[in-house]
Image (spheres, grey):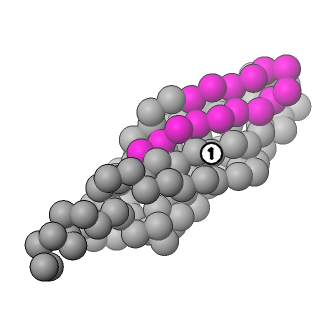
Amino acid sequence: INFINAVNASPDMQKALIAVSSFKDPGMKSVNIQSVDIIPEGNALRISIKGSAAAKDLIEMQQAYQNLVVSIKKTKGMQLLSDRIDISSKSFQMELKYTEQSGAVIRK
């Protein structure tokens, strides 16, 4: 029974939220995460993030957004599936896949 439960178990949503909260970094002050949706998918979680980059100019917006992407890629267990940024509205949307790793959430 334990084996069946382990095979069918999806990752802990709390750990996924901790991973998402670890994205904040000093170079991303202008990044605002407005919504996070988490959906179990087999042995992983699909995470949709919507937000905005309220920067003074396009260069600052791009840098803040790029810092977010780099931060996501450094987060253990997190995979960036797709990302999209709309320059006119300064909004972005990302699709991520989270698979639970043994140990704590660690950034490289």
Left or right of 78 on screen, residue 69: right
Q: Quadrant of residue 85 in the image?
A: top right
Q: Position of residue 96 (x, y in %)?
A: 48, 42
Label count reads: 1
Q: Look at the numbered disc 1 and give the secondary structure of its residue.
A: strand
Residue 102, percent from left and from top: 24, 67
Can residue 87 be seen by looking at this rendering? yes
| Above or below 105: residue 94 | above
Quadrant hosting residue 103: bottom left
Residue in the image at 85% along x and 27% along y: 89
Residue lying at 78% horizontally and 21% vertically, measured from the top left:
87
**Extreme residue toward the bottom, this view:** 1
For badge 1, the amino acid type reads Ile
Residue 29 in view here: no
Using the image as rendered, state which of residue 46 and residue 105 is in the foreground: 46
Residue at 73%, 43% (x, y): give it: 51
Instruction: Give whichever of 22, 25 is nearer the camera.
Output: 22
Q: Does residue 4 lie above or below 76 as drawn?
A: below
Task: Determine whether, in the image, residue 8 is placed left or right of residue 39.
Answer: left
Look at the image and tell me in which quarter the N terminus lies: bottom left
User: Which residue does the numbered mark 1 point to in the structure image?
Assistant: 49
Query: In terms of image quadrants, where is residue 12?
Result: bottom left
Tell me the chief SS of the magenta region.
strand
Neighbor class of circle 1 (other Cα within 10 Å; few <14, some 14-19, many 20+) is some
Query: For this rendering, which residue is in front, 85 or 25?
Result: 85
Residue 18 at x, y = what percent? 51, 67
Where does the magenta region start and end?
A: 83-97
The reply to whether the magenta stretch includes residue 51 is no
Q: Position of residue 60 (x, y in %)?
A: 76, 29
